[in-house]
Amino acid sequence: MNTSYLFLATGFEDIEAIATIDVLRRAGIEVKSVSINDTKDVTSAHGITITADVLFDEIDFSDALWLILPGGLPGATNLADYKPLVELLIEHNRAGRNIAAICASPAVVLAPLGILDGREAVCYPGFEGKMPNAHKGFTPVVADGNVITANGPASAVPFALSIVATIKGEATAREVAEGMLLYNSKCQNYYF
C-alpha cells in the first residue's frame, strides 16, 4: 500500500488534478495518474491535454493507498459513469481505505455510492443538494474518517496537503507548504 492513484476522465479540472499530483510528489509520495479513457491522453475541462501515467486496466489497485478524484465537468460525471471505477470505490470504502474527492466529485461520484452517508463533506457550491445524506461542512477541506473532500479549484493545494498530512504527518505537510511559499514558519501560519 505505497501508491496513490488520481483518476483522469475527459473534462477533469486542471488545477485540481495537477496541483494534487504536484504536492504529493513534492512530499515524496508515489502517485500515479490513471486514465479511464482508451488512451493515456486525457483532455481537461479547459482544453489542456495531458498524458496519464497508466490506463485503468493496467493497474491492480489492491495495494492502493489513496484513490483520488479531481472534479470538473464533465470530468466528474465521466468518472461516475465508469463502472470499473465505481466498483473500485465501493470496495475500497467498504474496506475502510482512503478516498479523496474535490469539487463536483464528492457530490457527483461519491454521494450516489453512499460513501458520504453520515460523514461531514464539502463539494463545489451549488452541488450540496446531491449529497442529501452527508453533513455539509463549511471549510474548504474536510477530513472525516477515511474520506477527504474539498470544495473546488482554489482548495486544490490545501486538499493535497491534507492528504500529505495523513500519509506523512503534519510536519511534512508544513515543510512542503513552506517550500511552496504557502506556510510561514516564523508565524506558524498557513497563507490560506
Image: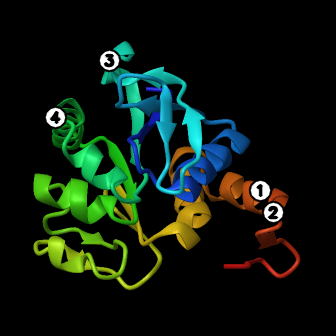
State the CA–CA distance, disc 4 to disc 3. Answer: 12 Å
Q: Amino acid at mark 1?
A: Glu
Which label sits on residue 175?
Answer: 1
Residue annotated with mark 4: 83
Q: Residues within 10 Å of mark 4 (few under 14, many from 20)?
A: few
- Please state which of the two labelled residues, at mark 3 or mark 1, is closer to the viewer: 3
- Please state which of the two labelled residues, at mark 4 or mark 2, is closer to the viewer: 4
- Please state which of the two labelled residues, at mark 1 or mark 4, is closer to the viewer: 4
Instruction: For the residues labelled 2 and 1, say whether their Cβ atoms are less than 8 Å apart.
Output: yes
Residue annotated with mark 2: 178
Instruction: For the residues labelled 3 and 1, say whether their Cβ atoms are less than 8 Å apart.
Output: no
Q: Earlier in the sequence, mark 3 or mark 1?
A: 3
Q: Secondary structure at mark 3?
A: helix
Viewer-nearest residue: 134 or 126: 126
Q: Earlier in the sequence, mark 4 or mark 3?
A: 3
Q: Secondary structure at mark 1?
A: helix
Residue at 62% across / 53% down in the picture? 19
Question: Is residue 5 found left or right of 114 in the rendered image?
Answer: right
Q: Residues within 10 Å of mark 2 (few under 14, many from 20)?
A: some
Residue annotated with mark 3: 57
Q: Residues within 10 Å of mark 1 (few under 14, many from 20)?
A: some
Instruction: For the residues labelled 4 and 3, say whether their Cβ atoms are less than 8 Å apart.
Output: no
Q: Residue furthest bottom?
A: 138
Question: Is residue 54 found left or right of 22 in the rendered image?
Answer: left
